[in-house]
Image (tube, coloured by chain):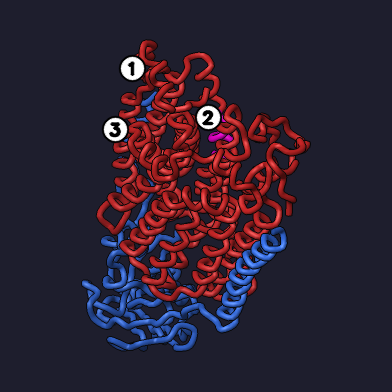
Chain colours: A blue, B red
Amino acid sequence: MDSRLLIVSSLLLLCLSGTTCHGSVLFSSLKRTLSVHASPKQGAKLKAGEDKITVTWDLNNTLPASTDDQYKKVKVKLCFAPISQKDRAWRKTENEMKRDKTCQFTIVDRAYDSSAKTEQRFDWVVERDVPTATYFVRAYAYDSAGAEVAYGQTTDTSKTSNLFDVQGITGRHVSLDIAAASFSAFSVLTLFGFFFNEKRKARAGK
Amino acid sequence: MEEPEELGGKDVEFVLPVDSDKKATEFRLFFLAPPHMRTFHLAWLSLFSCFFSTFAIPPLQPIIRDDLNLTDTDIGNAGIASFTSSIFSRLAMGPICDLMGPRVATAMLSLLTALLIFAFSLASSPNDFILLRFLIGFSLANFVSNQFWMSSMFSGNVVGLVNGFAAGWANVGSGATQIFMPLIYSLITSFGVASFTAWRIAFVVPAVFQVVTALMVLAYGQDLPQGNYSSVKMKMRENMSSKEGLFEDLFHGLKNYRGWILGLTYGFCFGVELTVDNVIAQYFYDRFGVNMQVAGTIAACFVFANCFSRPFRGVLSNVMAKRFGMRGRLWSLWIVQSVAALLCILLERTNSLMSSVVVMCAFSVFVQGTSGLTFEVVPFISKRSLGVISGMTGSGGTVGAVVTQLLLFSGSKFSKQTGISLMDLMMFFCTLPISLIYFPQWGGMLCGPNYIHSSSFAEHNYHLLA
């Protein structure tokens, strides 16, 4: 029973490690054909829920016009810079696109029009669930099967330039502070009330 | 509140049959009869709320870690901190129960830690997170008062079973929270509340629950079948506690090597269970990409086995004891814990979600069963120092949790998978010392009883339970 399980597990492991087992796409196989720009410059500090990011993207104009014929959809995402991934395994960069956790927030998801040769643009207010961290912007192009085929990003290959910060909301509100304080006071008062009552009964009993 | 009863005065009518100490000799699970069964239900419910609150944090960890900008190191340190505090609080709880009675001790701890859970809603930095998890961890000391309270209310022939049910059902709190906290969070976010505010509001629920159970304990509970500590006569209290005093009992208990061995093995069954409670939701979330609600539900399955596995291991132990005596109890403890270790190895090797869940459930049954079996042996080590031995074993559990969390799951040194496989190897090797436990009148795993010395053994005032 154990050896059969071991064989099955090993087969599964081999299968998953293979690149073409389920056709899972690798980031290293994607071509950097899109030219992406975002409004925040290097070191800019944005506030979640308040500030806006304007992203623009189009095909890199040094490439032939037919390069993007396959592209059917584009997703522009907010991605963590290496400094915000450090010691945080849930934001790890993996080569296998299915397991990659670098880009967790979608700015815009729309159809890619390869006939329109103009720059695409989108304004996005940084959402309130974006945490405090350092980011860059990346766009993925998808084919008709929904698999990534190309990308573009605002930073360089080593992800060191053109990074900006977002200050997330704390999530705290004055009303919550008041509620917590009131409940806590109630707990403490009840405890003291109980001790006082017990002492009073003991004295009355004597 | 109950009126105080005088010992040696008129015979009070109890619903359950009682012995000479007025402790119940029968355990009827679905009764609410005061004082015995009512106390049982109050005790397990208040400990349930403590587990519910302490383990409310792991299922919401994916949101909290982003809000407070935590790193893996911070999360690991907080997990360790939450167990470290309960080591000391569990050791201290025994003497506190002796002093104030288990009712007041339980309620006081619950109310004070409820304060901290309200404060947790206000956390805004990694240091707040670690500090609050440390302080909230004190609430797990209610385990000691829970077991102490049951031992004060129930007689020797059923106390093992009662303790098993009380502890097992209370432990379910740490599973219930893994399901309910993500659901409460989803409900709040469905009203359009931002995620970073929603988790803070969600924490009001476990805190209020804990306050309610504490108040119920104060209003409806009593320390002893005869009444509360404050109203029971001094003479009776002297009869109950050891004549030589608290320090003698403490020293007596600490000298007993069996207590230390059980502390070690409990560290690697209950300790492992605590650590897994902390990491399992994140493990499934990160490894298999399931969402928070599903990860929470899977984690909850791990804990729900407590509902039946702990109490019924108590039954298994009784059956083994009837046929093979203490040797049967020791053998069943070793076998069940070793199987748990092997299943843990298998958990790390499985790669599909479904088989992982199945193996995890099997692992949970065995590891929780071991916890139950350990406390089946504890009452036999020393009646006089029962509190101390229980405290040592109980603390051993949390020491084990701290050690495994510290060595294997803090920071990014090991992936969670490697951590799990190393943990189960440690578990297997730390189970072997059970073979060293030897009772002269009952024997040990490898040796039979030594009848020649058993009578002088009794003279050493061990007063072991039959």
User: Which one is nearer the viewer's eye here, B239 or B41?
Assistant: B239
Residue B113 located left or right of residue A20: right
**Amino acid type, label 3:** Phe
Q: Residues within 10 Å of mark 2 (few under 14, many from 20)?
A: many
- In magenta, the rendered stretch is B305-314
The disc numbered 2 marks a residue on which chain? Answer: B
Residue B169: percent from the left, percent from the top?
59, 43
Q: Amino acid at mark 1?
A: Leu
Query: Relative to the observer, which residue lies in front, A67 or B237?
Result: B237
Q: CA distance from mark 2 to mark 3?
A: 22 Å
Give amino acid for label 2.
Answer: Arg
Q: Are marks 2 and 3 in contact (CB under 8 Å)?
A: no
Secondary structure beneath dot 1 equals loop
User: Which label's residue is closer to the chain start, 2 or 3?
Assistant: 2
Q: In the image, what residue occupies the spot 48% across and 84% down?
A: A125
Q: Is residue B12 magenta?
A: no
Q: Residues within 10 Å of mark 1 (few under 14, many from 20)?
A: few
Separation of marks 3 and 1 at Cα, in angstroms: 17 Å
**Which chain does the numbered disc 1 sit on?**
B
Identify the mark nearer the N-term, 1 or 2: 2
Residue B345 x, y percent position in the rendering: 35, 36
Q: Which mark is residue B313?
A: 2
Magenta-drawn stretch, dominant element (helix, strand or loop) = helix
Looking at the image, is B211 positioned above or below residue B229?
A: below
Say whether residue A188 is left or right of residue B339.
Answer: right
Q: Do residues under tags 1 and 2 come within 8 Å of each other at their CB atoms?
A: no
Q: CA distance from mark 1 to mark 2?
A: 22 Å
Residues flagged by tags 3 and 1 on a common chain: yes
Which residue is the extreme one toward the top?
B452
Q: Which residue is mark 3?
A: B429
Q: Which mark is residue B446?
A: 1
Question: Would residue A118 be seen by someone viewing this image from the given angle?
Answer: no
